[in-house]
Amino acid sequence: MIEFEGVTKQYGQSRALDGLTLTIPDNGLFVLVGPSGSGKTTSVKMINRLIEPTSGTIKIDGQPIDQMDLQTLRLNIGYVLQNIALFPHLTIEENITIQLEVLEWSKADRQKRARELLTLVNLDPDKYANRYPSELSGGQQQRIGIIRALATKPKVILMDEPFSALDPVTRTQLQDLVLDLQKQLHNTVVFVTHDMKEALRLGDEIAVMRAGSIQQIGTAEAIFNQPKNDFVREFFDIERQPTTLTVQDLVAADLGTVVSGQPETIATTASIKALAQALIAQPEGVVVALDDQTQRQLTTTDLTTLIAKRGL
Amino acid sequence: MMIQQIQQILTTQSGELLQALGQHLEISLLALLIAAVIGIPLAIILTAHQKLAEAMLQVTSVLQTIPSLALLGLLIPLVGIGTVPAVITLVLYALMPIFQNTYAGLSGIDPALKEAEIAFGLPRAKRLLRIELPLAMPLIISGLRIALVMIIGTATLAALIGAGGLGTFILVGIQSNNNALLVVGATLSAVLALVVSALIRWLGTLSFKKITISLAIFVGLFGLVEGVTRFQAAPTKITIAGKLGSEPEILMNMYRDLILADHPQYDVTVKPNFGGTTFLFNALKADQIDIYPEFTGTVLQTLVKSPTKTNQNPTKTYQLAKKSLQEQFKMTYLPPMRYQNGYDLAVSAAFAKKYNVKTISDLAAWNQSFTAGFDPDFYHQKDGYQGLRKTYQLKLDAKIMEPSIRYKAIADGKVDVVDGYTTDAEVARYKLVVLKDNRHFFPPYQGAPIMKESFKKAHPEVVKALNKLAGKITEDQMQQMNYQVQVKHRKARDVAHDFLVEQKIINK
């Protein structure tokens, strides 16, 4: 259990956190969500003392963290960064096990742990253990970022907007991975995001923040259905606003039938409203060109499948 | 022509070349090592103090802008001459690239990586050794490379203050107008720079661990070699130095042979091409050298305060120089050798025969304007051509020429008369005739060993050995010896030894 008790952070004249009081329960996925400047990143970085509060106390399992040994604290908290931040000169294995070096694990044990973790995220250890980060795709790199945070089997894992730099498809895959890992390992995950959709998808419990204080805490459903104030309602209104899905999203979700030698009848950038209108005019399907050779035929079924999966 | 000369230098002086190469490398690597030991940790410490680091960057940049010669000069009153000021100068120069690159490498690390290593609870040493230094390594290595190439280039100037190295060949080459020697020195220094630069580049391709191990081995070996060399220092140590040129080098070697003939167990070091008059004199004062040959005229004109700067009588000049040195500097000036090395006028043998001239008065007696090529200094000075003209009523059609060109001009018959020094090798080389200064216009310059009074008292046996040269060596003999070294490229050491044996001053 992580407790914030009246935590304030002052930067000169401005107050990044204003008397934050908050309890993060064990073994759940707790999401801090809010626009930039709301204090969510400041809060999470206080848990591993990258940022020290101006006043107030933070406790883990009842013990104030400023009375704990700093290195022990940090070695027992997993941390996933927004910029992934794999060490470019170390192999994947060395990246994953860098904290285990500090804990003086033997080389064989470290190797074993790295293989376990790679297998956990569906990356072949024989193939990836000795590669360097630059040889991996962005999504693969953040998988490594996540398992690096798991290396010491920490009880608490902090994730600071870990997927904001990834493309939507990869982001969805990694969100699934985080949900899956949390179910398997029962860690306490504190996840920071500015993306309301991500918050709703992941959070067992969500804290909506604004200007250094909490607006509402609750389950996704409670917050979505009973917003406590105008700010929370408006923040979620973005989710209620017309969808920005395009034909590209259908292609990315691997919908439609591959065809060839057909003239293009709709662009990949067209909105799904335009697609729906085109499908009324051409019920047999419209054609989108992927490159010079391949095209895909999209039908009304493809459109409804996407909406069923992603929502509007 | 030049290629043959270079080949000759490479075969006859290979020992000296190797020694100079070794010295050069030693000074350079020592300087690099010291600069790295200062620069890298300083950069590591200052990475956490940005303002101090900026100040330090300024300081190292300013050091870089001081001309190396000026820096060498500034250091002489503080640490004297020789290897120490040379290494200090090189270290100061090397600091900037090493410090700057290390600092840039460390402070340029992605802040996200720094946040990660801190958040993971890595201890300071682990962060530095496992993450930060390896990430900064490419820049650090390139800093070391830039520094070493610069050091090797600048180290050629070390010869000016007696630290030896390849610069000696360049200096002697310039001084004696021997382009082959200059080319050899400059080329070797360039090749050395390229080779070590390639070596460091190769080092940069290794992993951080291997780099550390290689550097440790290198430092260990270097320290071992230095230590062993220092440890082997022999009992009585005497250091003889001399100015740039073949003549001082021949004399130094004679001194050495004379001392060793009586006391073979002594450890006598000869430091040729040690720089100019003031350098040497200061080195003597600072006990960095024990003995060096100096001219009586130079003592009076440059070193001591004396009411009369010149005296036409050689014996009186010597007595005056000796007395002033003793009173003003507590130094001893041993009796001089026979020959005089001063300005003279020379004509070709054919000319001397045709016009029957043996003295300058003979030349003046001809009511005819002969052509003359004079060194600019000689032409303008009162104790040069201007005074000479009045004394002898000379009517010459005199042109100013570069010193190196004027001997060529007389050899090619372009001019009839040139100025020169009495013992110049060119007199023998071009078969010239030196005209007798029958009115004793030119001030006498006689060479003799100069040393501290304390040294004389401590080593009467050395004084005794050196005095065997008093009153010896004529101008012709000195010319011949200079000719052997400068033109025939024989070793000064051999020429000196052969002379002493021939003259039965020493046995064997």
Image (cartoon, coloured by chain):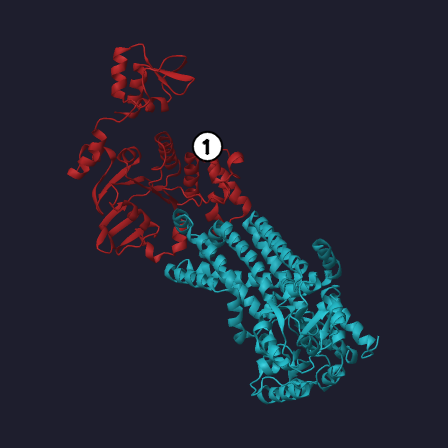
Q: What is the secondary structure assignment of the residue under circle 1?
A: loop
Residue in the picture at 73% in, 77% down:
B255
Q: Position of residue B425 (x, y in %)?
A: 72, 69
Instruction: Give the colour chain B carries in the figure.
Output: cyan
Residue B102 visible, this orientation: yes
Query: Which of the two residues, A206 or B327, is positioned nearer the viewer here?
Result: B327
**Looking at the picture, which amino acid does disc 1 mark?**
Asn
| Picture layout, residue B495 above or below residue A149 | below
Residue that mark 1 sits on? A122
Q: Position of residue A237 (x, y in %)?
A: 20, 32
B499 with respect to A106 (left or right)? right
Instruction: Give the colour chain A carries in the figure.
Output: red
Q: Position of residue B48 (x, y in %)?
A: 40, 58
Query: Which of the two residues, B223 or B90, is positioned nearer the viewer here?
Result: B90
The residue at the far right in this view is: B508
Quadrant housing residue A53: bottom left
| Picture layout, residue B330 above or below residue A3 | below
Query: Which of the two residues, B195 or A250, is positioned nearer the viewer here?
Result: B195
Residue B287 visible, this orientation: no
Quadrant housing residue A10: bottom left
Report the chain holding disc 1.
A
Classed neighbour count for the residue bearing mark 1: other residues with Cα under 10 Å, few (<14), some (14–19), many (≥20): few
Q: Quadrant of the C terminus of chain A?
A: top left
